[in-house]
Image (cartoon, grey):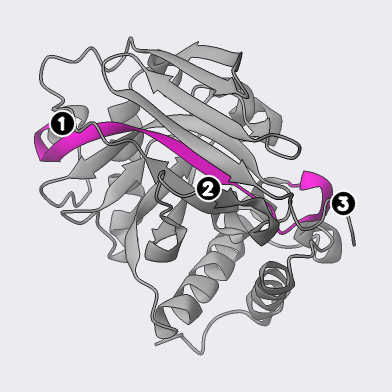
Amino acid sequence: MISTEVPEIARQCAAQLAQSERIRKPGRPLTERYPQLTLAEAYAVQQLNIEHRLQGGERIVGHKIGLTAKAMQQLFGVNEPDYGHLLDTMVHDAARPLDLSELIDPQIEVEPAFVLAKPLRGPNVTLADVLDATDYLCVSLEVIDSRIENWRIKLQDTVADNGSSARVVLGSAQVKAQGLLLDDLITELEVDGKLVETSNTREILGHPANGIAWLANAIAPYGGSLQAGHVVLPGSCTKAYRLRGHRKVTARIAGLGEVTLALANEPARVGES
């Protein structure tokens, strides 16, 4: 049930973002239309649209974490990550080409995905708790997209826009955390046969599991928890790469294997208001 206490500004912002996603046409930054928009209100916007989608029959299958790299936190003027929800309709099968015309201006990132065997409920969740609760990890491609024109986003814009979530593609290899040096895995992104990004998982908050612990603790005061079976993306150590004009992407993480995704068509629109 959507609370009647949701601020009117949140309802207006939620309506704009839902409309932009539905018609695949980005709108003006929320922070331009509503300069007074707070971070708490931005999360209320996110929750409002997630609840609408749940009422329409979609299911939450996990979460994604963003702004885990220090450089990105400095860019947005924050000292902690942000998060969004993953819905069943966002999970894309790597065996099928991704139709870019379903999106606005998609970009892609490589991440190690955690699949939980046990729930995690804060406060005081630790890195060790995360590893103990993890069933397995796999390499993943996260396709991000923005319902804000030209990606002209501030922190409140991307939080309201569900962390700029769009699609997630999981690799087939399911690897146990035990024995993996999760804070030292070489990560690569290849686009149309060309290596475009190389990094290391230590760039994800020093250790990818730190992001999962942060999220479990961050949502605990609001009654939230991470559930068994859910997928959690801890953030990327590679830069996002625009997909327009490309036809194939491959993600590799040492020890976790690789996943390849074919791309079809072109994004719906870029930079329209």
Residue at which label 2 appears: 97
Query: Residue 49's image quarter?
Result: bottom right
The answer to whether residue 141 is above or below residue 24 is above
Q: Callout 3: helix, strand or loop?
A: loop
Answer whether labels 3 and 1 touch (C-beta < 8 Å): no
Q: Residue at x 40, y 45 (%)?
A: 95
Tell me which numbered mark, 3 or 2, is placed earlier along the sequence: 2
The amino acid type, in three-letter code, at marker 2 is Pro
* Comparing labels 3 and 2, the label whose residue is closer to the camera: 2
Q: Is residue 113 magenta?
A: no
The amino acid at mark 3 is Gly
Q: Which residue is mark 1?
A: 131
Name the residue located 83 percent from the left edge and 51 percent from the top edge.
Answer: 270
Disc 3 and disc 2: Cα gap in Å? 24 Å
Q: CA distance from mark 1 to mark 2?
A: 33 Å
User: Which percent across, then down, holds residue 121?
Assistant: 19, 52
Rounded to the nearest angstrom, the CA distance separating label 3 from label 1 is 41 Å
